[in-house]
């Protein structure tokens, strides 16, 4: 499968996440300022479907894309290989957010800690991957470094309401950037 064919998969994954976030927020009446994963929290209507459409499915699609991109670069230097493996790790952690759901009765403990851990692994693997891509892949250098800064600084600078949304947008931008700029498989 060539890099060109990966592009619609990555676009579709992010569109799926965005639509799930929007549709389920309206459907379930998610309060303003609630975590992005609120619609998939325990006890929410159709939480399993939300988690499948927002996190699990898109995460697995991006993981597949990361594997294919890495296969397209068999002679890649160490930094590029690490960047794409971190993309794979981040995509799997993204999917894990849908498996490790929030508990609305205990947001700071219990099962919610596992969800928060998956989110943190995703955020850190994604930030480190963007940094490595910025250092190792000339074709995505400056964009990856800017995205890395957004990923790592947005939660602290923009707070718990806006920060995660900016990180999610940065994730979409970075994975789309790689899908467009990494050389396609031969």
Image (cartoon, rainbow, N blue to C red):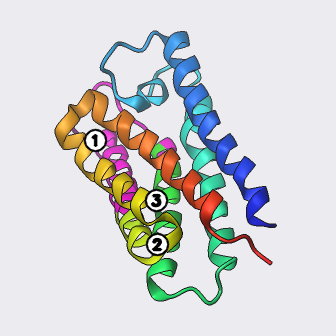
Question: In percent of the image, x 46 and y 59: which residue is there?
Answer: 90
Mark 3 is surrounded, within 10 Å at the Cα level, by few (under 14), some (14 to 19) or many (20 or more) other residues, namely many
Q: In the rendered view, does 66 fall on the left or right side of 28? A: right
Q: State the quadrant of the C terminus.
A: bottom right
Question: In percent of the image, x 44 and y 81: which residue is there?
Answer: 79
Residue 155 in the image: state x and y as whole percent.
Answer: 24, 41
Q: In the rendered view, does 38 fall on the left or right side of 155? A: right
Seen from the viewer's position, the closer of residues 33 and 14 is 14
Which SS class for mark 1?
loop
Residue 45 seen anywhere in this rendered image of the structure? no
Mark 2 is surrounded, within 10 Å at the Cα level, by few (under 14), some (14 to 19) or many (20 or more) other residues, namely many
- Number of the label disc, if any, that sits on residue 36: none
Residue 56 seen anywhere in this rendered image of the structure? yes
Residue 132: quadrant of the picture = bottom left
Mark 3 or 1, closer to the camera: 3
Mark 2 or 3, closer to the camera: 2
Seen from the viewer's position, the closer of residues 28 and 152 is 152
Question: Separation of disc 3 and disc 1 at Cα?
Answer: 23 Å
Count the labels in the image: 3
Residue wearing tag 3 = 90
Residue 112 in the image: state x and y as whole percent.
Answer: 32, 39
Residue 105 in the image: state x and y as whole percent.
Answer: 29, 25
Query: Is residue 107 part of the magenta span, yes or no?
Result: yes
Residue wearing tag 2 = 83
- Number of the label disc, if any, that sits on residue 110: 1
Mark 1 is surrounded, within 10 Å at the Cα level, by few (under 14), some (14 to 19) or many (20 or more) other residues, namely few
Seen from the viewer's position, the closer of residues 121 and 127 is 127
Q: Give the main secondary structure, helix, strand or loop, of the magenta stretch.
A: helix
Query: Is residue 94 part of the magenta span, yes or no?
Result: no
Start-end of magenta stretch: 98-127
């Amino acid at each position: 499968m060539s890099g060109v064919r990966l592009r619609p998969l990555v676009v579709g994954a992010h569109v799926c996440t965005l639509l799930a976030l929007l549709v389920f927020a309206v459907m379930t009446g998610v309060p303003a300022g609630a975590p992005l994963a609120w619609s998939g929290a325990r006890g929410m209507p159709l939480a399993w479907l939300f988690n499948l459409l927002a996190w699990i499915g898109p995460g697995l699609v991006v993981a597949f894309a990361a594997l294919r991109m890495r296969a397209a670069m068999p002679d890649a230097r160490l930094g590029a290989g690490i960047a794409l493996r971190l993309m794979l790790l981040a995509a799997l952690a993204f999917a894990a957010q849908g498996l490790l759901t929030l508990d609305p009765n205990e947001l700071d403990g219990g099962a919610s800690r596992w969800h928060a851990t998956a989110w943190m692994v995703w955020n850190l693997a994604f930030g480190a991957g963007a940094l490595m891509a910025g250092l190792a892949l000339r074709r995505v250098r400056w964009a990856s470094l800017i995205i890395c800064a957004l990923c790592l600084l947005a939660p602290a600078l923009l707070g718990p309401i806006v920060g995660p949304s900016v990180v999610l947008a940065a994730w979409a931008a970075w994975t789309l950037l790689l899908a467009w700029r990494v050389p396609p498989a031969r």
